[in-house]
Image: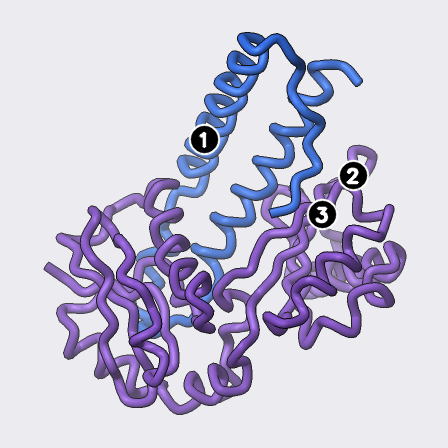
Chain colours: A purple, B blue
């Protein structure tokens, strides 16, 4: 058996996280690692190829913490360790920046505004004289300009603490990840519902911090 | 609006949400052990995409069947979750 790590919360909040079902129905436990609480369960081994159900289970465990009012940082899918001690050793090596991030964003959730690609929108093409890195940055710049065009910033600006723009693979659409305080979620949703330009948009959340899980050190 | 147009909207909406779910769970979040992430980078996303497609089509077919049994058209989908 190995220890699978789903996400992290502040150690002082671990008692508020309900017991969820992890992979194979195994109960998710909270393990204190320094200033952090790690949400883990025991698994036989990581599947060679994850299924959609595996992806949903990982997300659902984090969602149980969010639904209990706890701010959680998502750990990327597939992080397994030989046991709790090894997991804690790895986690504790990074606990200071992660704890700072959780303290800074305590009370916040991630909201994701999904905008489908327009039917007449041509697929992004890489220009011959620029590399993929620059092309990616260019595509993000275009997405931000797209947001300005939609009137997004003016409408939801006050309730959004941070924003990240991502493109979904295969040109399916654009995602605006927003960091929103829980007590401002209603304002956020209302602002979006009032924008006619977002009639085709889909709002997903509140979620654990996925896009805002990066630390600066 | 036609029945097919409504179904297409539901399908596209579900595809978008599932695509985002897969993308954020597999590609976002803290990396605690970089060694493990390298193996995860080998995930066959085409397989995942196929599963996603099959799942969505199955859900749509079930909804359509239920709607017909109840004698009404599927609702136009503009859900907020």
Q: Against B69, is A211 above or below?
A: below
Near mark 3 (Cα within 10 A), the count class, few <14, some 14-19 or many ≥20, is many
- Considering only vertical position in the picture, is A110 above or below A35? above
Residue ID for mark 3: A115
Asked if labels 3 and 1 share a chain, the reply is no
Q: Residue at x 73, y 20 (%)?
A: B5
Residue drawn 79% across the image and 59% down it: A191
Q: Which residue is mark 1?
A: B50
Q: Nearer the viewer, residue A41 or A144?
A: A41
Against B66, residue A48 (above or below) is below
Marks 2 and 3 share the same chain: yes
> Residue at horizontal 33%, vertical 46%?
A54
The correct choice, above or below, for B15 with respect to A202 in the image is above
Q: Nearer the viewer, mark 2 or mark 3?
A: 3
Alpha carbon distance from label 1 to label 2: 22 Å
The tag on residue A152 is none
Secondary structure under tag 3 reads strand
Q: Which residue is mark 2?
A: A118
* Label 1 Cα neighbours within 10 Å, binned few <14 / some 14-19 / many ≥20: few
């Amino acid at each position: 058996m190995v220890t699978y790590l789903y996400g992290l919360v502040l150690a002082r909040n671990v008692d508020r996280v309900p017991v969820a079902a992890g992979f194979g129905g195994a109960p998710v436990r909270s393990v204190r690692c320094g200033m952090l609480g790690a949400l883990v369960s025991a698994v036989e081994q990581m599947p060679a190829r994850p299924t959609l159900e595996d992806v949903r289970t990982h997300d659902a465990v984090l969602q149980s913490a969010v639904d209990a009012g706890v701010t959680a940082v998502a750990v990327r899918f597939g992080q397994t360790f030989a046991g709790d001690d090894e997991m804690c050793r790895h986690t504790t090596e990074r606990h200071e920046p992660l704890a700072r991030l959780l303290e800074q964003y305590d009370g916040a959730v991630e909201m994701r505004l999904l905008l489908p690609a327009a039917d007449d929108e041509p697929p992004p093409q890489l220009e011959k004289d620029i590399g993929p890195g620059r092309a990616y940055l260019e595509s993000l710049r275009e997405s931000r300009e797209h947001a300005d065009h939609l009137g997004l910033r003016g409408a939801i600006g006050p309730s959004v603490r941070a924003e990240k723009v991502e493109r979904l693979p295969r040109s399916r659409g654009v995602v605006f990840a927003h960091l929103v305080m829980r007590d401002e979620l209603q304002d956020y949703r209302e602002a979006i519902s009032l924008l006619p330009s977002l009639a085709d948009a889909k709002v997903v959340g509140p979620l654990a911090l996925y896009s805002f899980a990066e630390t600066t050190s | 609006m036609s029945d097919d147009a409504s179904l297409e909207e539901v399908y596209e909406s579900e595809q978008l949400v599932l695509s985002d779910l897969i993308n954020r769970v597999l590609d976002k979040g803290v990396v605690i052990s970089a060694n493990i992430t390298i193996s995860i980078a080998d995930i066959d996303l085409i397989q995942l995409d196929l599963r996603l497609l099959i799942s969505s089509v199955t859900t749509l077919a079930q909804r359509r069947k239920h709607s017909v049994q109840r004698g009404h058209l599927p609702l136009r989908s503009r859900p907020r979750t």
